[in-house]
Image: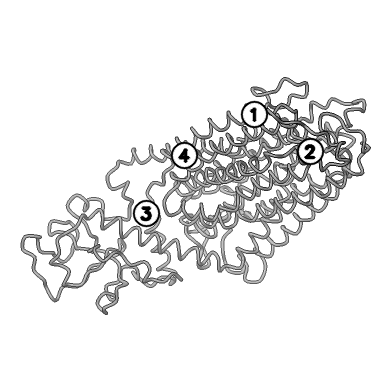
Amino acid sequence: MTNMSSLNPPPDAKFFSPSPSSSQTSTPVPSSSTTTTTGSQQPISLNSTSTGTRTSDDDYDAASTTSSSNTSSFLTPQTIAALRGLALFSSLVSALCAGSITIFSLYAPQLQARLHYSQYRVNGLASAASLAMYAPVPLLGYLCDRVGPAPLGMLAGLGFGVGYTGAAVAFARERDGVEGRSPGRVLVPAEAWGDKVGAARVEGQWYAAMVASFVIIGVATCSMYMAAVATCAKNFGRGKHRGLAVALPIAAFGLSGMWLSQVGSRLFGDGSPQGDVDVFRFFLFLAVMLFIVGAVGSLGLRIIDEEELIEDAVEELERSDILESSVLLSPSRVESGTANGYGTIPPSDLDEPLINPTLIKDGALTLKKRFVLNTETARFLSDHTMWLFALGFFFMIGPGEAFINNMGTVLKSLSPPPTTVHLFDSSSTSPATHVSIIALSSTATRLLTGTLTDLLAPSPATQHPQLTPSPIQQRQRFTLSRVPFLLIFSLLLSLGLSLLASGAMQSNPTHFWIVSSLVGAGYGAVFSLTPIIITVIWGVENFATNWGIVAVFPALGATLWGVVYSAVYQAGVRKSILGPGDVNDGGEEYICYGQQCYAPAFWAMAGSVWVACGLVVWAWKGRNGWAQRGIVV
């Protein structure tokens, strides 16, 4: 529990009762011209739930009879609705553009062919971006809950601009070095060294800069995604449609991969028969576009009526005996001589000049908000079912991330080497096509699961954390928990991974769309249902922090399975049909062909998803789990 003494208001923040003209019933306060101290006067509470004790002036009284935000106190309902609409539009546009990192597999083969990166190096870039995208989520979520989503939008725009510009420069310089075009530089053939060491010494000099750029891109992706999802969750996640409210920006994030991959392959192609993307120009395009989107998002991403959300959370804590009645603003704490009372004053302070009531209200809201968020964070971390759920998310989403990041090299492994006669049309297995398939299937399941769970899943009676057994908001003829939805789509994800591992696609690469669709559907549903379940069980007011803590786990999972896949792939390179001397100018010595390049890794990933399902069932039906505690999910 947060130390209450750390949440005290500044000593100069005096709190006063309403003026005599107030419509509220309260103890009068002498005017500033004739200040008189009345020894029998009782301290006044600012708690909005206490009748007759709201602090206000004449202008503020009209809006002080109910718990409402600063926004609603001076804006019409139509204006508030318009602001919510602007926030929704801004969050969806931000999410539609934020997923640029999901098309990594579109240009990953170019990093091998043009820059001669090994699979370890390519995975190093993907892992760096994944770690940077997930590792700062708790910090960014914490900031989003406390300062709002707008600063995160601006941070994202700056990060994307710097990151993609740096990646473009590093790619161009690395490519020129490999092709021997750098001024004053001589390309030393690998054969001159007798092994790959020579090539490594003259290639990859800009690799560190490329890694740093992708780290910045990962942080920017996290920032823009978190701002978009938190905006929708807090503005629209208080009713029975909270599932769709959370699913919309997440679905838009999934769509970003589809349209960006098509833009990259169609508008920024390098003119080759394979339809490869011009990486340098595409990176510059992303830098400019995403900087603009971030700047616009910093203006439109807002939480409307946040005070009402916090006030309701305080009431919920009081009803659940987690917080003693009006402990934040208790007069008794002041009367006893302590300094921990909020919104109250001792009689001796009544002879001080009145201060701006708006500042009083803002200060009280800040204190309440800080206390509520800190309390809910502590309860979230102390809930053992959260850790089971987060571990399940780790084992589910990590394999999906690894598949998406490495799909480009998997597709290369399905095709015969360039020296072999092609007996099938390889154009249908281009990375851009399957990035779009994953994006479409992922988006469809995100919207589907958000809508179906709103219609079929039981709704708790509260929008705040379920601290006690929660009654269902409305009785329906048929209800289905959100957990079975999560388990079903997780099994679809494992089915796609198992099909790939079985070698079924090796002889039928044109059917790879089946794997892409299954993995995309499972991945999208898991990424949609996980934050929805978090809002249902642990509330929306601290959503960004809670979701940020859980979202760290995919970074670890993606890194783990990326390393496993790289090890299997590099082992397959040594067993490949290409001999040691069969090296060509396209960098084919780094490319593996055949089932041995990926099968062991994807069998292990499928097993990981099965373990995840067991952990989720344990959190749901296990000892002291959600079902046993009466938590509606």
How busy is the neighbourhood of tag 4: few (under 14 within 10 Å), some, or many (20 plus)?
A: many
- Marks 2, 4: nearer the viewer: 2
Q: Single out the residue that lies furthest toward the left.
A: 34
Q: Earlier in the sequence, mark 4 or mark 1?
A: 4
| Disc 1: which residue | 280
Above or below, comparing residue 279 to residue 624 in the picture: above
Above or below, comparing residue 68 to residue 442 in the picture: below
In what element is the residue under mark 3? helix
Foreground residue, 474 or 538?
538
Q: Position of residue 224 (x, y in %)?
A: 52, 43
- Marks 1, 2: nearer the viewer: 1
- Marks 4, 1: nearer the viewer: 1
Q: Tell me if 307 is positioned left or right of 537 in this view.
A: left
How busy is the neighbourhood of tag 2: few (under 14 within 10 Å), some, or many (20 plus)?
A: many
How busy is the neighbourhood of tag 3: few (under 14 within 10 Å), some, or many (20 plus)?
A: some
Q: Single out the residue that lies furthest toward the front.
A: 184
At label 1, which amino acid type do we have? Phe
Quarter occupied by the C terminus = bottom right
Q: In this orientation, does residue 122 appear?
A: yes
Q: Are marks 2 and 4 in contact (CB under 8 Å)?
A: no
Q: Are marks 1 and 3 in contact (CB under 8 Å)?
A: no
Foreground residue, 520 or 15?
15
Q: Which mark is residue 308?
A: 3
Q: Tell me if 597 is positioned left or right of 40 in this view.
A: right
From mark 2 to mark 4, how far is it between C-alphas? 37 Å
From mark 1 to mark 3, how far is it between C-alphas? 48 Å
Q: Which mark is residue 129?
A: none
| Disc 4: which residue | 88
| Disc 2: which residue | 409
At label 2, which amino acid type do we have? Thr
The structure residue drawn at horizontal position 5% and vertical position 63%, both measured from the top left corner, is 34
